[in-house]
Amino acid sequence: MAYSQENKTILITGATSGIGKEAACYLASLGAKVVASARNKEKGSDLLSAYKEQYPNGQGTIELVEGDFSSLQSIQNLCEQVKTSYPVIDTLINNAGVWKMSYQETKDGIEETWQVNVLAPMLITHSLIDLVKKSSDGRLVFTASGLHKGVVDLNNPEMRQSFSGMKSYQQSKLADILLTRWLASKLEDTGIGAYCFHPGFVGTSIGRDGGMIMQKLMKLAGMSPKKGAETLNFLATEPQENLVSGEYYVKKKVKKITAESNDMEMANGMIEKGQTFLADYIQSDLFADLVVNT
Ligand SMILES: NC(=O)c1ccc[n+]([C@@H]2O[C@H](COP(=O)([O-])OP(=O)(O)OC[C@H]3O[C@@H](n4cnc5c(N)ncnc54)[C@H](OP(=O)(O)O)[C@@H]3O)[C@@H](O)[C@H]2O)c1
């Protein structure tokens, strides 16, 4: 069932390709004002054209905000831009992600997977949670992955000495699940839900760092991005009384997963660690004023 998203403002990151692009267009078609992050103007305007083409009778709009998550300053600027332009965010979707095959550093000198997949969602959620608190149906959605595995190495999350593209990606996706559970526990009884999901194996550009062959294989073997966006669309639109905050969803259903993904001690450690990387960008403790009264 498609629920109207009229009067909703939905912020989605990683909206210029793959799963995020499909979701942005679908959610706008239901009447939402979708605020889509783009790191590249050309891809931003491609998204707007795709929306018009795919949903000529779409009820809502897509507006672009600029940000490259390989720069913490750029993330900060994006959040400031959002705060100036939008009084409320009903749904905040942290979807942008990378899968790097080799150790690469961002403009901040931080390993890229750790920054884009973990620190960016932390900083964005921290910066914009006040806008989500203003919604009567506030929700946070994180794109995780079935590849989540292992632990978050709190001493060496960037894997500086022994980088593995697979392990780094697995760790980052476990971190996204821990972040979801941690936020859900802090937001309990506030009316704001936090959810994460695995989209399935989807033929997108996530494997681009692995070269043309990997990309072609993914596109051939993976499901379509439209199909891959279904659980994201579900979590963004389903009435929250039908959802369980803090849970990990696959094919629109809660899936029970590893003990590590429920390890709240590890989640606390990860938040503390994240804060050390983000120290220049946050004035108070990360999420210090998270708990709100309803
Ligand atoms: N595909 C799968 O099988 C699969 C499975 C499980 C989970 N996921 C997760 O799904 C999410 C979406 O990925 P996808 O599969 O749709 O891949 P995708 O087609 O590569 O899309 C990734 C999105 O993230 C954006 N992004 C990457 N680095 C960025 C940066 N530094 N700053 C700002 N935005 C950045 C990309 O922007 P550009 O368009 O500018 O590159 C793009 O919009 C990711 O979190 C991924 O880990 C995917």
Image (spheres, rainbow, N blue to C red):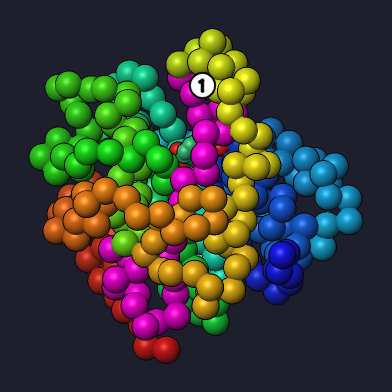
The spot of residue 232 in percent (x, y) is 56, 53
Crowding at label 1, few (<14), some or many (≥20) Cα neighbours within 10 Å?
A: some
Tell me if the residue at label 1 has its CB under 8 Å from ligand 1: yes
Q: Residue at x 62, y 33 (%)?
A: 223
Q: Nearer the viewer, residue 229 or 256?
A: 256
Task: State the quadrant of the N terminus.
Answer: bottom right
SS at circle 1: helix
Q: Which residues are magenta?
A: 182-209
Left or right of residue 125: residue 224: right
Residue 215, image quadrant: top right
In which quadrant is the C terminus drawn?
Answer: bottom left
Answer yes or no: is residue 129 visible: no
- Residue behind mark 1: 208
Residue sitting farthest toward the left: 155
Q: Residue at x 58, y 28 (%)?
A: 222
* Residue depicted at 50% across the width and 58% down the height: 253
What is the x, y in percent for residue 292?
36, 82
